[in-house]
Amino acid sequence: MFNALFKVQWKGTRAAVLAATIFGFAIPLFSIRALLDAYSDGQSRLTAGNVVRAMQSAGVLYALLAGAAGLVVAFLAWSSDHKGRHLYALSLPVTRSRYSLMRFGAGSLMLLLPSLGVLLGCLVALLIADVPAGMHAYPLALTMRFLLSSFVAFAIFFAIAASSQKAAGVLLSAIALFIVGSTVIAAMGVNVDLISRAGELLFNAPGVLSVFTGRWMLIDV
Amino acid sequence: MSSLARIAGYLVMLGCVPIVIARGQDSRILAARVQRATAEAVRRSQALAEFQRANARAKLMTDTFATANGTITVMTDRGTAAAARAAMARVDSTVRVLGPRLSLLRGSTLTVQFDSSRRYNSEAKPVAVLRFDTPPIKGTFFTVTPVDADSIAATIEDQTSQRLLQRSATPFASWFLGSLPIRPADLEQEPDWSSVRYDILDSRAVIGKRCYQGELTACSMLLGLTVADDPIMSWYDSLARVDYVREHPNDARAYNRADTDACLAGSDAACGRVLSSMRRLDTPPVGASARSPLVREALLMGGPGAFDRLVSNTASPSDAIAAAAGAPIDSVMRRWQRNVREKSIGSEDLSVKIVLMTLGWIALLLVLSSRISRWR
């Protein structure tokens, strides 16, 4: 049954997954290429600071791609069920939790491809450029971070997509209410920044999105 | 008018000259007296205000005791007395490593006063204001710290070592830009070697890369232990020199227009002259971030008495460090250089903590997804 689910899910998501894989492959190459082009004229020296800054700039792209890949794969995982109003799933002789696990497993396997793209991109990028003396390349650590981030995004959106429309509506309403409430409180002159506080809770360790923040460095000291 | 009357008039005018001169002198003298009196009044008023301030502070102080081998007199008020007394026990044992040179601080006073008007950072802890006077060093050091024994002790320990370096006025004291790691925990704390490595490799100076590759002479120059006759020409290459001028053309032109233009047109000698007139790139390219770890290495190598040998050595900074380590400066630098190359290597992209935390969240979300009973 898992194979059948996987095949159906693959058909629905392969275009997005392949696009994410190509982007994943391109980001490290792009970051290294941009760095080399900027300093290839011999007019300026490539210092550790230049390398670190270039890698940090590309870090945003890895995080965005991981988030986007997780989101797309998660929503596409449930799209066929949503279209069929879950009739096919209900006709299967499995429990809901087992079915969810299989969907999750199939989606997780899809996410391996963009990560593989990132890993290959990193390795190729390191082949075409010499790592400056004293600096070190971390292709595996970067790929693992990408994989974990895409998994987190996938898990969050998978949970949202798995819920009913009513639950998703409640969640979105709660978020909207929170933003409106925070804005009203700020407008009343109360010195409490709820949105920043919520951001800290989400993005600072041990927040659920903390894996997205921090350093995404292919080359570092 | 008759000539007799005219002569009489001239005589009268002539007679007035000394009077005018005398009056002029009188007014200058008077002005000087007024100025002196004003200055004296200001001085007295300031002295009175200072006396009143000191007296008021002294009245508030409820406890007085000595620390750092009796060299520093500590005065505390009611709000800080308990914490300060507890801190002094720690300070006494910590600053002992500085040895007999502590006597240089004799006559120092430290006041620790509770300040009810403010709180420490966002933690809203009660605050103590510390004032450190070390005659003959001019100026009082002020700082605020939470009213707890550890914070007060840490502040006093840091100030004691810094003031001791200031008072000892050795070449090492002038060279050293950081805080001496006098607490045992400071010595145990591994420096951030990746940050030192970054500073060295990010420097424009060619000696940075040469040092990283193992050339100890370059390390010595990089650390400011060896003085170069012409640092701009010996520490930097032509690319670094023209790079700097290219990045600051307006500054450079303000100092030396002709040489700036010649430099930008490709004359390396002109670049050297411009930088020299700008007084840029003439100080060692790496500062405290690299020097403190070197001193730490020396202290670790030197064992007991290392601090005393370090602060009491009046020869060059290299000699002081070698004396502290009980080994040649090259041995200390080699150890430092090896650490720069080999320590703190590892990606900050990923850590066990990040992995475990993320897997925990994924597991939680997976459980949540499987528990959502949409089919019911």
Image (cartoon, coloured by chain):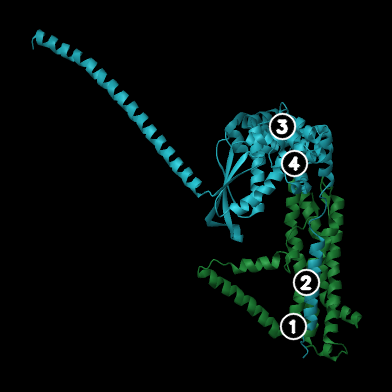
Q: Residue at x 57, y 74 (%)?
A: A181
Q: Is residue B261 visible?
A: no
Q: Are marks 4 and 1 on the same chain?
A: no
Q: Amino acid at mark 2?
A: Trp
**Nearer to me, B360 or B296:** B296
Closer to us: mark 3 or mark 1?
Answer: 3
Left or right: B166, with B374 as reference point: left
Query: What number is the disc on residue B290?
Result: 4
Mark-to-mark CA distance, 3 and 1: 73 Å
Counting residues from the start of the chain, the first of labels 3 and 2 encountered is 3
Mark-to-mark CA distance, 2 and 1: 18 Å
Left or right: B64, with B271 as reference point: left
Label 4, residues with CA under 10 Å away: few <14, some 14-19, many ≥20: many
Q: Chain of mark 4?
A: B
Give the quadrant of the C terminus of chain B.
bottom right
The answer to whether residue B294 is above or below residue B76 is above
Query: What number is the disc on residue B361?
Result: 2
